[in-house]
Structure formats: structure tokens, C-alpha cells
Amino acid sequence: MSNEFLSTYGGRNKNLPQTLTLDHVSPATRLLEKRRQMFEVQEALDAQKEEFARREDAFRRREEALRKKDLELQESLIKFNKFLQENESKRNRAIKRAADEKKQREMKETEITKLTRQYHEKMLEEKALKEQVLKNEKYQKFLMDVVEFVQGTSEDFPEVQDLLNRYNTLRVANEDLNKRQTNHDVENEEKRQQFAQFTKERANEVLNRNNEIATLQKNLEGHAMATLQAQYNVDSSISNMSDKVLQLGQMLASIENLLERFETQAKHMKRNKDTPKTFGDKADVSGSAEDLEREGKRAHEHLEDIAIYMIDYSSIVREWEAEIT
């Protein structure tokens, strides 16, 4: 394997010692020979790496030189193209400049004529301005006097321009205040209309609520009258019921008293009844409906007994009258 490696990667393989014949040697000698071969292979590998590094460095320097030459060639080509473009551009500019200069010359001639006319107009305007300056000198003198007067009392306006600036500031502020006043008047008018509309709506709402209150009050009075009528009816029903209960109690008491008198005066008439008769107990008519029904049945029985007594009494009277006659 080491011979194949050395013969394949060349370089220093011709100077390496030949491999010993290891067929008839001891294992230790063979091991030492293998180690020696590995060391020689490592040396050959290191030498090969150094050779590759030198070649790689030479290739890199050559590549950099070629890249630099290529860049220089491209730069030269760009400069040449730029030179051609600049020459073409200069030629075009020169042609255009000639046309522009001709056009400008014509324009200048027209402008000269125009400026000449404007010069005469400006001369007339200058004359008018001079006359106006003469008229306004008194105002300039007035402003100077104001500045001198103010300087004696304050240092806020040392120059006329400061006074004019102050005037311009106040004028702008006055215009702003007038504009704000106008806006506030418009806003105030809008708010006034809104308030009037709001007041009208609230008044209508209050009127509607008062109408509702009046309607509810009327309904309340009607319900109160109905309640009073119902209470009166209930009281009348209770009064009538009390009278009827009182009459019923009196009737039951009368029936019991009448039966008791019959039983007292007719002791000789003994009747066997399934239901024993009790006297002296007052009828209870203040109880429930069952008690009233029970008392009614009892009164009916008593009436039947009274009817029997009355029939017997009539028979006795007829017999007695027959005996007398």
C-alpha cells in the first residue's frame, strides 16, 4: 500500500528506501519496518502538501494578476467608450449650441426691443416714484421723530424698520383677531340656533310629559273612584251579610225558643228521636259555611218538630171543642 501511495503521488518517491523483504523476519522487525514505512509515507505526504501549497499560491497569484489585467482592460475599454461618447456628445452639443446661440441672438434682439420699451416705461415710473417720494418724505420725517421720541423712553424700537415691523405685526394680529371674531360670531349664531332648537324640543317634551302626567292623573283618579266604589260595594256586602246573619241568628234563636216552649208544656208527649234534642245552646251563625249548613239542618229538624207539636195541639183543640159542644 505504501509503495502504491508513493508511486501514485510521486514527488520524492524515487529517493525513498526500497521496502525490505519481510517474509522471513520476526513480527517485531516487521512492526518496526511498518512504522518506518508509515513515517516515510507521512514525510512524503507532508512534502506533497507543501508542494500543493506552493502550487496553489502560485496559481492564486497568477489568477490575481489575470483578474487585475482583465479589470484594467475593462477599465480601458470603458474609458475608450466614454471618450467616444464624450466626443459625440461634444459634437452634438456644439451643433445644438450653435442653434441655441442663433435662437438666443434672435431672442436677445427681441428682448432688447422689449427692454428699450420697458426702459422708457421705467423712466416714467421713476419720475412718478420720485414725485411720490417727495410727498412721502414728511412721513419718513414723522417716523424718525417717533423713533427719537420712543428711544428717550424705551429701547424697543431703535430703528424705523423696527417700528414698521411692529406695525405689520399688529396689523396681522388685528386681521387674525377680526377673522377669529367672525368665526366666533358664526359659531355663536350656530350655537344660538342649536340652543333655540334644543329649548323648543325640551319645551315640546315637557308639554308632552305634562299631557302624559295629566292623562295618568286622570286614570289614577278613575282607578281611585273605582277602588272607592269597590270598597263601598264590599262594605255594603259585609253590612248586608251581617244583617242577614243577624236575622238568621234571630230566626234560629226563635225556633229554638219556640221548640223549647213546646217541649216544656208538652212533657207528656215523649217522642223517640234518633237525634237527641238539646236546648239552651244558642245557634252559632258566625262560623264557616259548614257551620251555617249544620245549623240550617238543625233548624229544619226543629221546625219539623214544631210542626208536629202544632198538629198535635190542633188535634187537642178540636177534641176539646168537640167535648164542649
Image: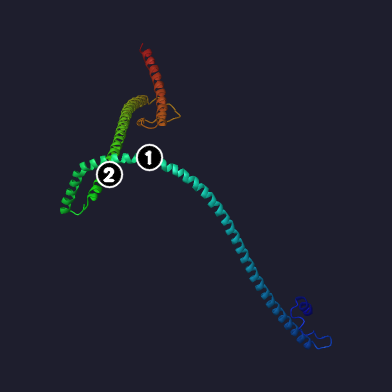
Q: Which of 11 and 100 is in front in this view?
A: 100
Q: Can residue 300 be seen in this view?
A: yes
Q: In the image, what residue occupies the spot 57% across and 59% down?
A: 79
Image x and y of residue 89, in percent: 54, 51
* Residue picked out by circle 1: 114
Is the C terminus in the top left, top right, bottom left or bottom right quadrant?
A: top left
Residues at discs 1 and 2 in contact (Cβ within 8 Å): no
Residue to which mark 2 is pinned: 172
Q: Residue placed at 38% from the left, 14% from the top?
A: 318
Q: Distance between the residues labelled 1 and 2?
A: 39 Å
Q: Which of 233 and 92 is in front in this view?
A: 92
Residue 63, position in %: x, y? 65, 68
Tell me where residue 223 appears, x and y as whole percent: 34, 28
* Tag 2: amino acid: Val
Q: What element carries label 2?
A: helix
Q: Which of 112 and 245 is in front in this view?
A: 112
Residue 294 percent coordinates (x, y) = 42, 29
Q: Which amino acid does label 1 sit on?
A: Lys
Please tell me which of labels 1 and 2 falls first in the chain: 1
Left or right relative to 87: residue 304: left
Q: In which quarter of the image is residue 37?
A: bottom right
